Amino acid sequence: MTLPQGLAWQQLRQEALAVFPKGTSLSRNKPSTLAEWYRSGVIIPSVSSHRKSLAFLAPQSEIAKVLLSESALFLDAATEHAVTARNQLNAGRWYSAAWLCVTFYYWAFFLALSFTRMTSRTVVFLNKTTIADLHLISGSNDPSPGAGAYILVCTNSNTPNLLSFEVSKSRESRLHELLWKVLFERIKALREISGNSNPDEERLFRTLELTFDRLGDAWPSDLRNIANYSPGKAYSAGRQKSNFYGFGHIQVNQPLSFEDSLNRLENNVLSIPANSTISAYPKLAVSILIDLTFALHRIAQQLQEDVIERRDIDRRWLTSRAEFLKLNCEIETDKGWPYRN
C-alpha cells in the first residue's frame, strides 16, 4: 500500500492546481516569502473587507510564487527535523525522549504549514506593522483588526489572472493551535469526500481525523506544551525513565511501509477512549504523533511533487532536497526516510 489517491486526493490536487498556474516561478536561490510580498507586491483592495477580515485581489503569478516558495521552505524545515530525528535514533546513545518528541512535533508543524500553503487555506501571523499596512491598502473604515493569528484564504476571482485573497483574524490567538484546527477541518473534509470510492483513502483520512476527535483539535500542540512547559512531566531522566519514551518501535535502518505505519496509527488511536487527555496517555500520544508526522510527510511531499510535475515547474529545489535527505540518511530507496515505498 502506498499513499492512496482517490476522490479526496483528486479534489485536493485540483484545488492546489487552481492556485498554481503552469510555469509558476520557484527559485531555491532567491525564495519568495509572504513577509516580503506584503511590502512590495501588487495588492489591490476589494470591496468585501469588514471589521475582522481584509479582502484583496492580487496577480495570480505573484501570490502563487510566494505560496509555493513558502511551502518549499517549510518542507525544507521539516526535512531537517526528519534527518535530526533519524540520526538521533540511530546514534546508539542515550537521547532525551522529551526533546525528541518536540523534534517530531516541529517536523509535523512545518509539514502542516507546507501542506496548507498549497491548499488555498493557511495560517499566518501578522504583526502590528504588516496588518496596519494591509488595513490602509484595504480602504476599510473599520478599525484595524490588530496583530495576531490570521487565516489566509485564496480563491478564484472574476478577473482574469487575479486571485482573491482574504486575511481573517481568528478567535484563536495562538498560531500553533490555529494551524492544527485548520488542518483538522481540512482532514475532516477530505474524509467526507473520499466516501466509499477508495477504502484505503477513506481509512487514511478517517484515522487522521480520529486522532483529533480523541485527543482534541489542537492535540499536537498540547503534547508539545506538556513536554516543554510542565515541570517533571517529560524531562525526568535524572529521576526516572521519561513517560514520553515511545520511540523504540521505529525502524531506522530499514524504513517501514506506509501501510505498517497506518496500521499502527489506527490501532493506537482506537485504544484511546473518547474525550481523553494527553496527560493521561503521554506515551501513546507520542506514538500517535510519530505516525501522524510520517503520514503528513508523505502527503505534503506528494502534493508538492504533483504540483511541480503537472504545472511544469522547476524541479531543482525538489531534487536538491531529496539529495540532502538521501545523503544525510544514507538511504537506498527512492522515497527514503521515513518510508521505504
Image (cartoon, grey):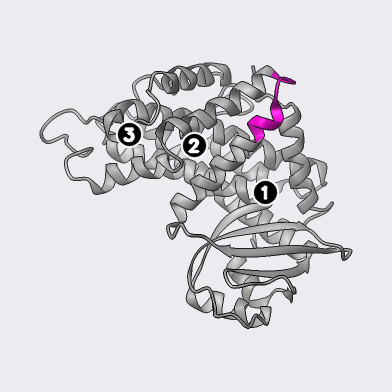
Q: Nearer the viewer, mark 3 or mark 1?
A: 3
Q: Is residue 81 above or below residue 174?
A: above
Q: Is residue 122 left or right of residue 229?
A: right
Identify which residue, 310 or 85, lies in the foreground: 310
Image quadrant where one finds the C terminus: top right
- Which callout, 3 or 1, points at the residue further toward the start of the chain? 1
Report the magenta residues as a range.
Answer: 190-198
Identify which residue, 116 or 260, lies in the foreground: 116
Q: Residue at x 30, y 41 (%)?
A: 99
Kindly state the secondary structure of the residue where label 2 is placed: helix
Q: Classify mark 2: residues with Cα within 10 Å, few (<14), some (14-19) or many (20+).
A: few
Kindly state the secondary structure of the residue where label 1 is placed: loop
Q: Residue at x 70, y 73 (%)?
A: 41
**Which amino acid type is shown beneath numbered disc 2?**
Asn
Marks 2/1 in contact by CB < 8 Å: the verdict is no
Q: Indicate the position of residue 235 as horizontal and vertical percent values.
A: 21, 39
Q: Which residue is mark 1?
A: 118
**Which amino acid type is shown beneath numbered disc 3?**
Thr
Q: Indicate the position of residue 12 as horizontal and vertical percent values.
A: 72, 39
Marks 3/2 in contact by CB < 8 Å: the verdict is no
Q: Which residue is mark 2?
A: 328
**Which amino acid type is shown beneath numbered disc 1?**
Met
Q: Is residue 197 magenta?
A: yes
Q: Is residue 227 magenta?
A: no
Q: Nearer the viewer, mark 3 or mark 2?
A: 3
The answer to whether residue 33 is visible is no
Kindly state the secondary structure of the residue where label 3 is placed: loop
Q: Which residue is mark 3?
A: 277
